[in-house]
Image (cartoon, rainbow, N blue to C red):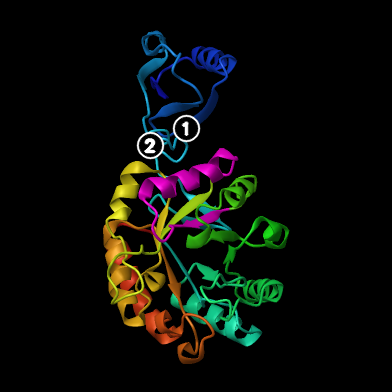
Amino acid sequence: MIVIFKQNANQKDIESLCRGFEANGLSIHESKGAHTHIIGLVGDTSSVDIDWVRANSAVEDVRRVSEPYKQANRKFHPEDTVVDVCGRKIGGGHFAVIAGPCSVESEAQIIDVAKAVQKSGASLLRGGAFKPRTSPYAFQGMRAEGLELLREAREATGMPIVTEIMNTEHIPMFEDVDVIQVGARNMQNFELLKELGRLDKPILLKRGLSATIEEWLMSAEYIMAGGNKNVILCERGIRTFETSMRNTLDISAIPMLKSKTHLPVVVDPSHAAGIAWMVEPLAMAAVAAGADGLMVEVHNDPAHAKCDGAQSLTPEAFDDLMQKVRSAAAFFHKVL
């Protein structure tokens, strides 16, 4: 249930009403905008008399929310959430590009790529230290050493780092990571999501391979219910019957998400198709559809990459892409 207050509502009347809700065991989540003041009631609201609430002099309107996700719901929070990562903003008209290799392979590799993508205009550096792989024989990442190399790359460039976590036991190792990524395979690892909800750190939540939009938003709700409101959604393609590409990028998910949630939405065109030459057209489509950012894989030697070389751009190709993305972002009134 959401309660919308009048613009000139008396603060004492609002506080009195809120105390009454809390006395009935309801949690209150407040959202204040330039012209709106809304509270969301979370809990068993079945006993709340809407007409009685609406009769309060401070109340403009009352609405029940049927969707199971509450805090991620745009009805609870009409204005776009802007997630600030060390001064780099994502959402609410701010566009960010996250770029870097699929996996950290060496000090020279990650620092070389970090400097290249920074020069081209990327805002954040991505790189996998822990890698979930379908085959147990594939490269699993450098783990703790990879995290240390990411920190060295941040020291060399000043770029915030984004990297994927695998389980709750690794959380202490991620204390110095700027954005923690939850991969597609962990989207419904609810114990992990609950623990991440206790952190004061941005979480980039990728969509599961076959997840519906509601399931995805419910996973975001797990994080937000724990107190962490800094959630960024990442569309990375879903599994369909098509076999000519790795996944099918769900472009339609972007405007649909924008109608349902206030959370920022970024798109990963690299994992979507798994083919380097498709990254550019998919990235441009994402910008046009309203995405708040991109996540692009860049490697200085894709042919010899230990992970996902086929979908990685060279630094030169990434620079060409960034010139087009910068123009497109400006056209759609996004600040890059």
Magenta stretch in the rendered image: 202-228
Q: Where is residue 10 in the image (x, y as percent from the top left)?
A: 47, 14
Q: Is residue 256 above or below residue 148?
A: above
Q: Which residue is drawn at 69% across and 61% down?
A: 170
Are the two marked residues, 2 and 1, in contact with CB atoms closer than 8 angstroms?
yes
Name the image quarter holding residue 293. bottom left
Q: Which amino acid does label 2 sit on?
A: Pro
| Numbered mark located on residue 193 in the image | none
Is there any visible trace of residue 169 in the rendered image?
yes
**Which corner quadrant holds the N terminus?**
top left
Provide the residue designation for mark 2: 78
Res 169 quadrant in image: bottom right
Residue drawn where x is 55% and y is 78% of the image: 114
Q: Is 54 colored magenta in this rendering?
A: no
Q: Residues within 10 Å of mark 1 (few under 14, many from 20)?
A: some
According to the picture, the residue beneath numbered tag 1 turns out to be: 31
Work out whether 106 lies above or below 284.
Answer: below
Q: What percent of the width, then of the height, locates residue 155?
A: 66, 73
Q: Please determine whether, in this image, residue 266 is positioned above or below residue 224.
A: below
Q: What amino acid is found at the position of numbered circle 1 in the picture? A: Ser
Graded by Cα atoms within 10 Å as few (under 14), some (14 to 19) or many (20 or more), the crowding at tag 2 reads: some
* Quarter residue 250 falls in: bottom left
Whether residue 278 sits left or right of residue 308 in the image: it is left
Q: What is the secondary structure assignment of the residue under circle 2?
A: loop
User: Relative to 295, does residue 197 appear above or below in the rendering?
Assistant: above
